[in-house]
Amino acid sequence: MASGGAELEKPPASFKSAVWEHFGFPVRYENGKRLVDKTATVCRHCGTRMAYEHGNTSSMASHLKRHHPGESGVKKKDAQQLLLPDAFKQCFPAGSDRAIAITKSIGVFIAADMRPYSVVENKGFKKMIKVLEPRYEIPSRTHFTTKIVSELYEEQKNIIVDELSKASSVALTTDGWTSRATESYVTVTAHYITAEWEMKSPVLQTRPIYESHTGTNLAQVLTGAVAEWKLERPKNNIPVTTDNAKNQVNAVKEAGLGPQIGCFAHVINLSSQRGLTVNKMDRLLGRIRKVVSFFHRSTTAAHVLKTKQEMLQLPTHKLIQDVPTRWNSTYDMLERYLEQQAAIFSALTDKALKKNIRDIVTLSDDDVKVAEEVLQVLKPLKMVTALLSTESAPSVSMVLPLKTKIIQSMAPSEEDSTITRDVKAAIKADLNCRYTDPPDLQNYLHRSTALDPRFKSLSHLDPALCQRTYSDLTTEIVGRLGTEEQEVKTI
């Protein structure tokens, strides 16, 4: 490599003169092809270019004597040793296979690991790449922004579109969410089975929503996704799972998709919140939140609590502050409080904290009994939420059986306190009205459950409805088989 960084071609092994250790033929690239100019040579020390006639090395020898006298007498073996590091200083051409492969891998790293484009400018990242491959030069972040990641996206999109085109049925999930910068987005995910019977759930798109979240505006996002990803199915509807907000229900209807299925985990969240906000229960939780907040605000209080935990041989767990919109965080807060109630009481009565406590009241024995009862009431809902969160297979067949089981668990008991009865009644009342309308949705859920071997007895249904479900399902299957046979004959 010349001192300016240009790529040079080594002379053939038949060229015996020692001067060739200091000169090479210049290389250029045209249309991706590597071209060597053997009518000229370039000095590896200073980059001087000079004409070359085959076999004549006198001009090169003169150049060495005049400009690099310390090199002109170097023996061939020594010259090789001196020039060996140059091979590692010579950068790959940007269009070389090796450079392209490394650049693409960095693009995959950025996209797959959700890294910022600026990572390619970080000192640590540059140093790592330099150690791994000294001859590679990292392109600018703009190159990754405008070219590499965009190409990776199109490449992956084409693969998914091809798989979707071969899937007989597709279902969608929509999720509305807000970023830390308070920007609203809607994410659309597809669910389908490949020809190899592999379940896949790729995220198709995440789009910002600048307008109000009306059903019409959300419907445009859905119809746009269906068109862009070629999801139209003339013989099959596209079920869409959303949260249970009215605008989401209207969006699916306006987009001409369906059935719209409310997310069961979201339903459990709403029903549980309804139970936890009954008056007396809400006040009980309010007192617990004050205690938890006190230990979170004060480092002294947290230290005293930890000391008491160790003294009482309790786990040194921190108290959990719940998030109002997530019922399971309230469950976790309640469970942790009951686990640590002895340490909490001991800490709050410690002289180091007692003088700083205002408006903080520990739970009475009756309060603790109620809290323990309610925790047991909520336990099945917690288990169902965990099950739905970890389930990789479609869970639509589980909705009605699980709903029935939860409602059954809300039956009042003679031992229940008044608050516990109210919590159960509120949860049961909210769940009872879910997935009952429209009738087409209920029929869809019944058929889905019947196709799941775990629930094929349909024990949650009365015998007449069970028989009708299987009759409707048989008619649908026979009709589909007949249509497929007719299509085969036509072909």
Image: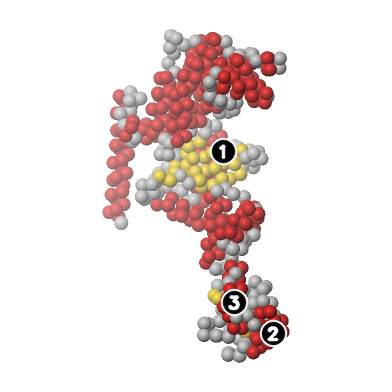
Residue at x 58% of width, y 13% of height: 363
Residue at x 48% of width, y 15% of height: 373
- Give SS at disc 1: strand
Q: Can residue 282 be seen here?
A: no
Q: Foreground mark, 1 or 3?
A: 3
Alpha-carbon span between mark 2 and mark 3: 17 Å
Question: Which of marks 3 and 1 precedes in the sequence?
Answer: 3
Per the image, the residue denoted by label 3 is 78
**Residue kind at label 3, given as amino acid type:** Asp
Residue at x 52% of width, y 13% of height: 370
Q: Is residue 63 left or right of residue 463?
A: right
Q: Which mark is residue 65?
A: 2
Judging depth in this view, the residue of 184 and 289 nearest the camera is 289
Question: Which of marks 3 and 2 precedes in the sequence?
Answer: 2
- Give SS at disc 3: helix
x and y, in percent, of residue 448 in the image: 37, 35
| Dot 3 alpha-carbon crowd within 10 angstroms: few under 14, some 14 to 19, many 20 or more | few
Question: Which of marks 2 and 1 precedes in the sequence?
Answer: 2
The quadrant of the picture occupied by the C terminus is bottom left
Judging depth in this view, the residue of 137 and 43 nearest the camera is 43
**Residue kind at label 1, given as amino acid type:** Gly
Judging depth in this view, the residue of 205 and 54 nearest the camera is 54
Q: Can residue 259 be seen here?
A: yes
Per the image, the residue denoted by label 1 is 176
